[in-house]
Amino acid sequence: MHNHKGSISTEQGSLEEVQVLEGHTDRVWCSAWSPLGDMLASCSGDRTVRIWSRQQPGSDAWSCSAILEEAQTRTIRCVAWSPNGRCLATASFDATTAIWEVQAGAWEQVALLEGHESEVKGAAWAPSGMLLATCSRDKSVWIWDAMPGHEYECADVKQGHTQDVKSVTWHPDGDVLVSTSYDDSIRLWSDAGDEWSCAQTLEGPGIGHESTVWGVAFDRDGSRAASVSDDRTLRLWRCGRDRGEPRWRLLACLSGFHERSIFSVDWGVSGIATGSGDNAIRVFVEDAAPEPGRGASDPGAAPPAPAFRLAAQRRSAHPSDVNCASGGAPLQGNAVPHGSEPPG
């Protein structure tokens, strides 16, 4: 049995609070940078989405530039920007996903996606912008075709999970969709031509998480992924080949850093950012390349264990759980927006 735990260095710095954005009147569930990093979207239990922009070009001060409201009747749980930054998808507990776009200088709702039977927990655009995935408490994942004229058509519905589906994330290549669930599993879906099929499930003793999986994030080239869970571990995965087919394997399991559930993960240019129920934000980075394993000639050799260190953390980042942390868009470098209050 291979030891998947990477070596850990405990040297660390701290995260500096740059600004507090206030305006929502209920818990903030999710925040997301626009692709260019010039806007930040946040959503809340107050049933609104707020768009934040720099007060002036080049300024470090941000303010609310738009409020998106009256489209959805319950908590808005997730916001997701389209790859071109023109559209914003908002997933709500009222079982709908709204699509917004700037028209004549103002944000307008241009579509409302219906079909889920219960709360929509997540939404994610494929890198091409031609597909949108949503997931729900109804245990399903929906894949939508985005067509001209703001038309959206359901391309497939996947029912593989046995409990709430908490998040959906696209691989950078757009050929794999990942879903995470209350059933403790991670499922990878691939396009089989006329439908999407489950190519692999990451679960089970010694490999998968031991409790609810809240999210997955890929590194920049898509060769590795990070996942977080109620089991308080950050697990790293690497994609290899098995008989010519891509297969994901556990690379490392980092434990002992988080005191409560880890609700959010983002793998950005500055490292892996996590948001936790212990009210803290942490950033992990990988040190120099690890020593090689037993040799490529051994077909049973485990991947070399990476060396990670906790590079920075902010304890008591919020008075309550940090349920969203984002590593920042290209123009925002080390900025880590985050939202607070317990997720559902």
Image (cartoon, rainbow, N blue to C red):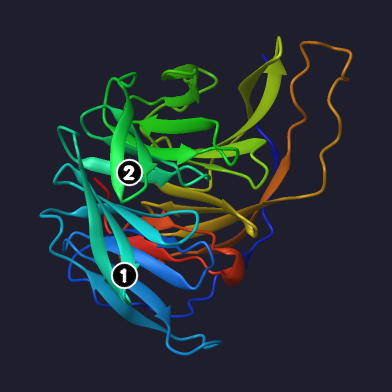
Residue bearing the label numbered 1: 103
- Look at mark 2 in the image and give the residue it sits on: 122
Residue positioned 42% across, 62% down in the render: 86
Element type at mark 1: strand
* Residue in the foreground of this view, choosing between 267 and 67: 67
Q: Residue at x 40, y 45 (%)?
A: 124
Name the mark nearer the viewer: 1 or 2.
1
Instruction: State the image coordinates of residue 268 (x, y, percent, origin top left).
Output: 60, 55
Say above or below: 208 vs 34: above
Question: Seen in the image, is 77 located left or right of residue 70?
Answer: right
Quarter occupied by residue 161: top left
Between residue 146 and residue 157, name the one nearer to us. Answer: 146
User: Which type of secondary structure does the marked residue at label 2 adopt?
Assistant: strand
The type of residue carrying mark 1 is Gln
Q: Is residue 315 visible?
A: yes
Q: Is residue 224 left or right of residue 97?
A: right
